[in-house]
């Protein structure tokens, strides 16, 4: 224990990741004039919100030692369904939003039941719901591509949650208010993870599920809750996605979950469960989004982002592995 | 005893902040069983890891078969005939016995694995050990004892000349231990050098020729086993006398109420028609051989495993227990025999473990009241004398005895009145064992009721007010401590049930 303190901040993965975020931003800004622009930042943030929401949610199943593969296709499915009600059926926007979020919550609970009650391996259970939501999304939206109302259009007010546009025409200014919204959510969920029973038992399940059960904890309920949170956040993410992407296409979404999961892992969520933080997850998502957005600006094809992200992930996991090895040696 | 096969001299090893080995020496001869003893954390394992190349020594020399050596890894040690039989079995359950023994070095015929040769070679190994195991059987089908034998067969198949047994008897039944000793004696007569690590004093007297004792990373001394007593060895290990005599009479008042009554409990093959009563302030010992169904009985009562039938009464009232949650709500706490897997969350702090079963009492609205949590954790650290620098210490960093105290704290924080201790001192060193005993006595005196499952006869006789003996899933005896003798208990524990 003493040793850990002597290494201090460097032993904390969050701090390392924070430094990486700063370095990436500074380097990209230094190399590329365009990257430095305010509009680039706003655009980057726009496409970060939904990944970040997915990542915050999936942090919970990851900490239990599981995973949720259904959040990518799920997010599209919920967005399509809510949007279909609004665009094709003429319901008010808020109905669509609420339906999307509840749909997500429902699928999350289903995932939880598959895993905690029916004992399916998380990978498999959520792979099933991943496929199902992919099909369901198309069915619910009647195979239409769904353009949610634009920012200026009637019923497009929800865009303002993430990006507030003031003025019109050339003078229009965009304020990324989503930063504030997300900051509040990050703080709130950090609290949930560190100061509530849900958080405590999520971590305990990931560390030692059987010991937790034998302590008289209703492990099933808390296990389901972890997946419900993930589903709920996939629902919330669908709103951010609808605000960022003009038209939601049926059949898409597969692969988005990997950015979110990758971000969480880069941010220090242990790949074997039992440890992780919401702040870390947020920073990890920043790393992934910076690479995705920034690399093209410095003349690297977008495909390189995938490769670099993969390498960063290996690095992040290695930190965890080395840490565990060192602990094993000390113990 | 023959020539010296291994000589470790003045071995020194430090980890950051810990002086793990302080100029330790060890000498093993051919045809000798050499016990290596010491409390947990005394440095036995570290010394063996230095020998087999897992750790690099800082100072000192290792002379093996007359030559100075420094193995770089276990593979190299193996190739030179130095092998370890681990406490935990490292076997692949789905492979056959033969496949396990030759894993990683399967004999080949062209591109194919030569199964026939592998099976024949395995048979030859078993013949050499005089044991009867079918090499084509799946490893998972074997008993723990037999798996252990396979582990030994695998070890000697490396042309071993020096075998290290790391607490080999921890999971074995008495009969299996006897078989193990026969094998060890056999190997000794084949002129191998044998290092035997164990906590069990009785075994040391039976099987070893010399004893080297370590304490706190240092070398204490080497004795000839025949010429010393148990007390001598224990004194060297802990530096004080602690062996205690059996309890002479029950400390439970005659009119103490029954707090737990179990009637006709059935749960699978291992729990058949078990009935008993536990009284307030009583320590009820559960004795029997490994596999007698004691742990299964405890788990069924606690709701950890499903039961088929049977009634449970707590304080005279019939209760339904279908999950550990139910049991905990009725004031029952279970301390598993396998702490690391079932007792504690190793990667979490003492505080988090302490309040695990009672977190709802430590909430302020929706949020966990961390200062209140810390207070109670501190209180029990003090009360149970848990040795730790702080409440934030991760339990993984505590010794076995202190981990056990954290589990006890967990149930005390929950206010559990009925405590089931399953092998309470397994893997705990001699000094800490005594502390756990004192603690259990204190708890009983304070009115907690304790079921103590133990495979150690001395522990049963020393702690229990009353003893229940089980054999093959059935209760075969109930003995008051006043009448209890080792012989009587063994007799009941090995009794064949008449149908």
Image (cartoon, coloured by chain):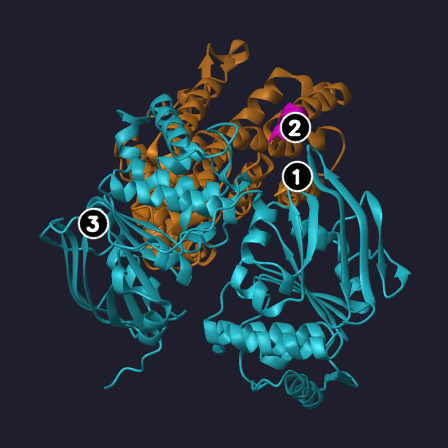
Chain colours: A orange, B cyan
Q: In this view, does B31 lie above or below B281?
A: below
Asked which quadrant contains residue B240, the reply is top right
Q: Residues within 10 Å of mark 3 (few under 14, many from 20)?
A: some
Image position, residue A237 (x, y; %): 43, 35
Q: Residues within 10 Å of mark 1 (few under 14, many from 20)?
A: some
Residue where numbered disc 2 is placed: A16
Secondary structure beneath dot 3 equals loop
Task: From the viewer's perspective, tell me whether residue B89 is left or right of residue A217.
Answer: right
For the residue pair A285 and B135, the one nearer the viewer reads as: B135
Q: Is residue B404 visible?
A: no
Residue where numbered disc 1 is placed: A319
Q: How far apart are marks 1 and 3 (CA)?
A: 55 Å
Residue contact between numbered discs 2 and 1, judged by CB atoms under 8 Å: yes
Image position, residue B57 (x, y; %): 80, 46
Q: How far apart are marks 2 and 1 (CA)?
A: 10 Å
Q: Read off the magenta span.
A: A1-8
Task: From the viewer's perspective, tell me whether residue A32 is left or right of residue A85.
Answer: right
The extreme left residue here reads B317
Residue where numbered disc 3 is placed: B252
Q: Which of marks 1 and 3 is in front?
A: 3
Task: From the viewer's perspective, tell me whether residue B65 is left or right of residue B219.
Answer: right
Residue depicted at 53% across the width and 66% down the height: B169
Secondary structure beneath dot 2 equals helix
Q: Is residue A259 above or below residue B101?
A: above
For disc 2, the chain is A
């Amino acid at each position: 224990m003493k040793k850990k303190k002597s290494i201090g901040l460097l032993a904390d993965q969050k701090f390392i990741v924070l430094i990486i975020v700063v370095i990436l931003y500074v380097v990209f800004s230094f190399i590329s004039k365009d990257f430095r622009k305010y509009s680039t930042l706003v655009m980057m943030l726009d496409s970060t919100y939904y990944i970040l929401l997915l990542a915050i949610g999936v942090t919970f199943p990851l900490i239990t030692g599981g995973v949720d593969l259904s959040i990518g296709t799920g997010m599209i499915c919920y967005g399509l369904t809510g949007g279909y009600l609004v665009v094709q059926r003429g319901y008010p926007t808020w109905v669509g939003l609420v339906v999307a979020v509840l749909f997500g919550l429902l699928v999350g609970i289903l995932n939880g039941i598959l895993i905690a009650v029916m004992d399916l391996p998380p990978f498999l259970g959520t792979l099933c719901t991943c496929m199902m939501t992919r099909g369901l999304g198309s069915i619910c939206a009647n195979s239409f591509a769904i353009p949610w109302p634009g920012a200026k259009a009637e019923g497009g007010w929800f865009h303002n949650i993430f990006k507030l546009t003031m003025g019109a025409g050339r003078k229009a200014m965009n304020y990324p208010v989503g930063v504030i919204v997300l900051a509040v959510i990050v703080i709130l969920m950090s609290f949930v993870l560190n100061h509530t029973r849900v958080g405590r038992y999520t971590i305990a399940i990931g560390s030692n599920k059987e010991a937790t059960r034998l302590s008289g904890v209703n492990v099933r309920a808390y296990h389901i809750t972890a997946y419900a949170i993930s589903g709920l956040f996939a629902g919330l993410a669908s709103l951010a996605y609808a605000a960022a992407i003009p038209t939601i296409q049926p059949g898409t979404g597969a692969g988005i979950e990997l950015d979110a999961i990758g971000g969480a892992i880069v941010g220090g969520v242990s790949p074997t469960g039992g440890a992780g933080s919401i702040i870390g997850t947020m920073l990890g998502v920043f790393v992934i989004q910076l690479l995705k957005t920034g690399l093209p600006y410095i003349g690297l094809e977008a495909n390189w982002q995938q490769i670099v992200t993969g390498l960063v992930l290996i690095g992040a996991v290695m930190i965890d592995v080395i840490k565990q090895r060192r602990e094993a040696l000390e113990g | 005893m023959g020539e010296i096969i291994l000589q470790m001299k003045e071995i020194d090893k430090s980890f950051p902040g810990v002086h793990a080995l302080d100029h330790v020496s060890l000498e093993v001869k051919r045809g000798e069983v050499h016990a290596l003893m010491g409390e947990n954390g005394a440095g036995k394992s570290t010394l063996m890891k230095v020998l087999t190349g897992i750790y690099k020594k800082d100072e000192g020399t290792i002379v093996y078969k007359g030559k100075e050596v420094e193995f770089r890894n276990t593979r190299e040690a193996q190739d030179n005939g130095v092998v370890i039989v681990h406490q935990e079995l490292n076997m692949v359950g789905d492979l056959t016995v033969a496949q396990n023994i030759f894993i990683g070095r399967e004999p080949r015929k062209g591109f194919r694995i030569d199964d026939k040769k592998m099976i024949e070679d395995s048979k030859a190994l078993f013949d050499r050990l005089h044991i009867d195991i079918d090499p084509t059987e799946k490893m998972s089908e074997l008993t723990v004892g037999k798996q252990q034998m396979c582990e030994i067969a695998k070890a000697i198949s490396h042309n071993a000349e020096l075998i290290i047994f790391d607490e080999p008897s921890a999971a074995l039944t008495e009969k299996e231990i006897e078989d193990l000793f026969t094998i060890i004696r056999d190997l000794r007569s084949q002129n191998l050098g044998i290092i035997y690590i164990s906590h069990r004093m009785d075994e040391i007297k039976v099987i070893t020729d010399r004893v080297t004792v370590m304490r706190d990373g240092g070398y204490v001394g080497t004795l000839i086993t025949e010429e010393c007593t148990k007390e001598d060895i224990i004194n060297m290990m802990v530096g004080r006398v602690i062996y205690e005599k059996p309890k002479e009479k029950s400390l439970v008042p005659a009119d103490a109420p029954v707090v737990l009554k179990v009637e006709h409990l059935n749960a699978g093959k291992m729990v058949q028609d078990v009935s008993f009563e536990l009284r307030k302030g009583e320590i009820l010992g559960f004795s029997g051989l490994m596999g007698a169904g004691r742990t299964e009985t405890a788990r069924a009562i606690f709701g950890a495993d499903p039961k088929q039938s049977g009634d449970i009464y707590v304080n005279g009232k019939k209760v339904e227990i279908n999950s550990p949650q139910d049991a905990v709500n009725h004031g029952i706490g279970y301390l598993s025999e396998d702490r690391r897997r079932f007792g504690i969350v190793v990667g979490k702090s003492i505080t988090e473990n302490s309040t695990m079963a009672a977190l709802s009492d430590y909430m302020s609205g929706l949020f966990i009241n961390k200062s209140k949590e810390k207070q109670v954790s501190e209180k029990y650290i003090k009360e149970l004398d848990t040795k730790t620098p702080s409440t934030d210490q991760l339990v993984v960093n505590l010794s076995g005895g202190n981990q056990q105290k954290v589990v006890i704290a967990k149930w005390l924080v929950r206010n559990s009145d009925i405590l089931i201790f399953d092998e309470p001192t397994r893997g705990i060193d001699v000094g800490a064992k005594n502390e756990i005993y004192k603690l259990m006595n204190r708890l009983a005196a304070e009115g907690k009721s304790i079921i103590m499952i133990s495979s150690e006869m001395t522990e049963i006789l020393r702690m229990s007010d009353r003893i229940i003996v089980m054999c093959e899933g059935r209760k075969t005896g109930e003995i008051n401590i006043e009448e209890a003798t080792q012989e009587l208990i063994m007799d009941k524990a090995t009794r064949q049930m008449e149908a």
